[in-house]
Amino acid sequence: MPTQDIIWYSAYILVLIGMSGYGLHRLIIVYLYWKNVRNRPEPRAHFDELPVVTVQLPMYNEMFVVDRLLESVAALDYPKEKLEIQILDDSTDGTTELCMKKAEELRSRGYDAVCLHRTDRTGFKAGALEEATQVAKGDFLFILDADFQPHSDVLMKQIHYFTDDKVGLVQTRWEHINRNYNLLTRVQALFLDGHFMMEQTARNRSGRFFTFNGTAGIWRKTAITDAGGWEHDTLTEDMDLSYRAQMKGWHFIFLNDVVTPAELPVDMNGFKAQQHRWTKGSIQVCQKMLFDILRSSAPLKAKLEATTHLTANYSYLLLILLCCLIYPVAMGNFNFQHSIYIILINLLLFFFASIAVCIFYVSAQIAIRPRSWWKELPYLPVLLALGIGMAVNNAKAVLEAIVGHQSSFVRTPKYGIGGEDGRKEGSLLKKRGYKAIKSVIVPVLELAFGCFFLWMIIELLIRGNIISAVLMSPFLGFFYTSLCSFGQMLFCLSSKKDEVQA
């Protein structure tokens, strides 16, 4: 076999081995979840007198969800005299006026509510939290992003865990107000269900580190201070602070049966912006924290899990490499004497890289909805396709983090959409300022990859290689992410045209 073929195929196998390693980790997480499923954490005691809790609500141009959020906070089943509401507003639009008016209204209803408006967005969300924490009255800080809608009993279900002086954080599981809004929100919900039900539960109950998800959790103020406070040199300040606090010895609690509902991004570009921020931020935290974690006195299992967690998004670079290497392998252009061994290797690696992912997400649905989990199975192919389709967007985020490219905190668009609003999607989104894509580079590359894999699948079908064509089909997810982005751009252009004509 020619030397260049050996090099090419060796690179292909190495990429698959790397991706399979993360697939194997998914299976380990599933094992750890079911092994510890009954080990639910319980409060050590109950407070005789409830402590003061400060609810912190970071805002940036959130006019469509302000009222919904603050009414949900006002409905919390917690004594008014023990509750402080901090609206942390960095807005540059009409949201500020709405926040001021709502804070005044809440005060007239007997709540201790204040709107802290900043004109300088230094540090973005982390900067707002750092400044507000310094003046917070409560020893415990319940952080909620603007798109959340907490249940009234959520504070009472968390607060008593802090009777253990070593507990620094209690995190709840996210639920989704608009889960059934469209196909994208349905698949996003599957992704997040897997993260929260499987990963967070398994890590917490097996004695490994897990991280605050930026919202829907309560921090002990002294744990934040002891860990060095909120820092804003990464885009995922929540992950950064979590690792620093746990290395200081603070214990975290994850409650998978206490849910806090939130709104999912309803459009592809909002989802891409969110995933870009999360992906880039995690790599930034990896570069900042990983060696400190490995040098710390944390248990070996915690170090290994943190390493896998913080490096997981590098797999998007591997996926892009796989896209570039797969053609001659899929087309059978290599002539191997021991092809049976090559087939077995490919099948084994494919199992860990793909089937393991399906097992992971199906397990999450079985855990959450044991009687109706099978209803989510039709969405698994879309989940795999979307995961592959996001490779260009997220690989770009990884590369930006590696080279140190600085970018601002891009908020996820929130339109105040619930499940019923799906019936009036077009008019609602036009009314609420649906945002077009700012750059066409990523969707153009996605479209190019989609065309490449469509051509490859057609050629495989012509050759009669149906199995390989089926295995290639998830790569058509590039069409999904690309065409959704371009469709959103056309939608916004038509909206602007309608406005001009009006």
Image (cartoon, rainbow, N blue to C red):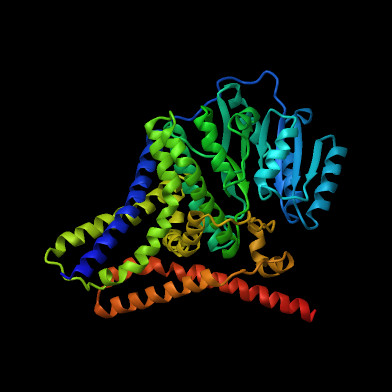
Q: Residue 501: image x %, image y %?
A: 78, 81
Q: Residue 70: image x %, image y %?
A: 75, 45
Q: Is residue 263 left or right of residue 114?
A: left
Q: Is residue 112 left or right of residue 455?
A: right
**Which image quarter holds the C terminus?**
bottom right
Residue extending farthest to the top is 48
**Of 498 and 437, which appears nearest the observer?**
437
Residue, x 24% and y 61% (percent of image)? 10
Q: Residue 197: image x %, image y %?
A: 48, 43
**429 is higher (above) or lower (below) than 111:** below
**370 is higher (above) or lower (below) than 353:** above
Residue extending farthest to the left is 337
**Of 397 and 272, which appears nearest the observer?**
397
Q: How many numbered discs sit on the rendered protein?
A: 0
Q: Residue 367: image x %, image y %?
A: 45, 43
Quarter of the image where one finds residue 420: bottom right
**Of 149 and 392, which appears nearest the observer?**
392
